């Protein structure tokens, strides 16, 4: 019964254990392991994400206090910082990347009908990267600049539900546009990117795979106008043109026609120009789709504020990627619980509740929907009020 189970255990009911075992077997994660299983490792790092732990010693100390309840949460081995550090360093980070993809596939099914502000039948993605600063002396493998280290998270965000569908973790020196080489292209889908991703040889791959891109154009774009289409300037549109590139290199890499849409953002007093290979959507819809690209920036800001991906429990590349992928697992798992239980609260509010009630014995739905509706009422008595009218 839920009354006898802690909230942490109820949350893990939404984790597909059989899929986790398949991921572990795929990369031999428990080869010659006797006690501390991959599931124990996941539980310890998920606990750290949900409760805001800052170090391995912090994790060990807090779990030691909760020792009588750890068995009911699923722990089958004692969590020591040395054991956890070795697991983060040696066990393949791809175990958690594959588990995250399983959770993402389930979450995308739940959020398939979610509205993101634009009426569009096709799938829309926002693609961008964020840089996580590191200490060069502790993370020499992530060399970024002369005195600085960093890793980049190249993220493809499904705008329906703000779910990360593809994540590529590289060192800070890797240019954003190179991530397009590994981006999975879905026929008919829209990929929205900033002008840092303009590489016409790589953009041509979108057209060849029947996918659509919307990218902000650079100011020095060399093009020739073929056709101008009428626009309603009251909506902010300034032009809708069919163009071809004129530059020697760009015209060779992308010889096909492009659509150029100019839009004036009155709120920020800024003129924006977009390039796309889609010629059927209204020009205003193209501009609104690009505005949705800001969701990926908000996603980066959110996970940096509310998940532990800025300070790491290990210094090796494997440990860093393990922590990032388990953080993504926790984020998506919380999104699944929100949709499955139809929780009205935001993900932030849910994580705050989990952080203080993780080991409480209470139905998870009751804990997430708890509302203090007690209304203070004046005591019923015959004493007269001092300032009664």
Image: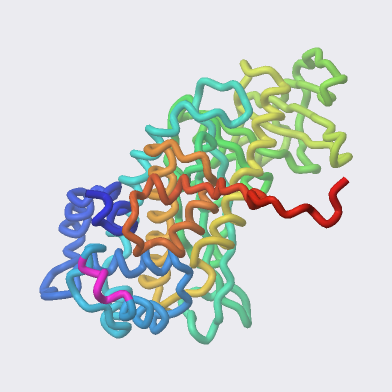
Magenta region's main secondary structure?
Answer: helix
Q: Position of residue 138 (x, y in %)?
A: 49, 84
| 327 on left or right of 65 | right
Can you see residue 225?
yes
Colour scheme? rainbow
Range drawn in magenta: 66-71
- Residue name at image x 50 percent, y 45 percent: 156
Residue at x 50%, y 66% (from the top left corner)? 309
- Relative vertical location of residue 40 with respect to residue 316 in this rendering, above or below: above
Q: In the shown orientation, is residue 212 left or right of residue 357?
A: right
In the image, residue 366 above or below residue 64:
above
Q: Nearer the viewer, residue 277 or 372?
A: 372
| 140 drawn magenta | no
Residue 68 included in the magenta stretch of the image = yes
Between residue 9 and residue 180, name the one nearer to us.
9
Does residue 261 sit above or below 319 in this rendering?
above
Residue drawn at x 54%, y 61% is: 306
Horizontal side of residue 195 vs 180, given as left or right: right
Q: Quadrant of residue 71?
A: bottom left
Extreme residue in the front direction: 382
Where does the C terminus fall, quadrant-wise?
Answer: top right
Residue 149: quarter of image: bottom right
Q: Position of residue 26 (x, y in %)?
A: 18, 56
Residue 137, image x and y in percent?
52, 86
């Amino acid at each position: 019964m839920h009354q006898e189970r802690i909230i942490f255990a109820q949350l893990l009911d939404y984790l597909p254990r059989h899929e986790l075992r398949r991921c572990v077997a795929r990369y031999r994660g428990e080869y010659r392991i006797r006690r501390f299983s991959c599931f124990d490792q996941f539980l310890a790092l998920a606990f750290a994400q949900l409760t805001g732990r800052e170090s391995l010693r912090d994790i060990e100390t807090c779990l030691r206090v909760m020792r009588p309840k750890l068995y009911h949460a699923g722990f089958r081995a004692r969590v020591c910082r040395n054991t956890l550090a070795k697991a983060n360093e040696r066990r393949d980070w791809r175990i958690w990347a594959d588990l995250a993809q399983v959770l993402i596939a389930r979450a995308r099914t739940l959020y398939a009908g979610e509205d993101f502000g634009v009426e569009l039948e096709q799938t829309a993605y926002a693609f961008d990267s964020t840089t996580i600063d590191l200490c060069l002396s502790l993370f020499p493998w992530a060399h970024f600049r002369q005195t600085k280290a960093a890793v980049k998270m190249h993220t493809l965000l499904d705008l329906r539900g703000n779910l990360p569908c593809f994540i590529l973790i590289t060192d800070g020196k890797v240019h954003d546009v190179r991530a397009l080489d590994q981006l999975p292209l879905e026929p008919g889908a829209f990929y929205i990117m900033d002008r840092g991703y303009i590489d016409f040889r790589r953009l041509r791959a979108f057209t060849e795979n029947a996918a659509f891109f919307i990218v902000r154009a650079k100011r020095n774009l060399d093009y020739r106008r073929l056709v101008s289409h009428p626009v309603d300037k009251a909506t902010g549109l300034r032009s809708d043109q069919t163009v071809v590139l004129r530059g020697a290199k760009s015209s060779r890499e992308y010889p096909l026609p492009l659509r150029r849409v100019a839009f004036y953002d009155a709120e920020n007093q800024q003129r924006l120009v977009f390039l796309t290979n889609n010629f059927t959507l209204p020009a205003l819809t193209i501009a609104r789709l690009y505005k949705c690209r800001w969701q990926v920036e908000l996603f980066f800001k959110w996970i940096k504020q509310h998940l532990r991906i800025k300070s790491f429990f290990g210094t090796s590349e494997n440990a860093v990627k393990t922590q990032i992928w388990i953080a993504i697992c926790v984020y998506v798992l919380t999104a699944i619980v929100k949709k499955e239980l139809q929780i009205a609260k935001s993900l932030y509010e849910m994580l705050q509740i989990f952080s203080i009630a993780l080991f409480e014995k209470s139905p998870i739905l009751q804990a997430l929907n708890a509302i203090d509706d007690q209304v203070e009422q004046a005591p019923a008595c015959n004493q007269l009020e001092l300032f009664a009218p």
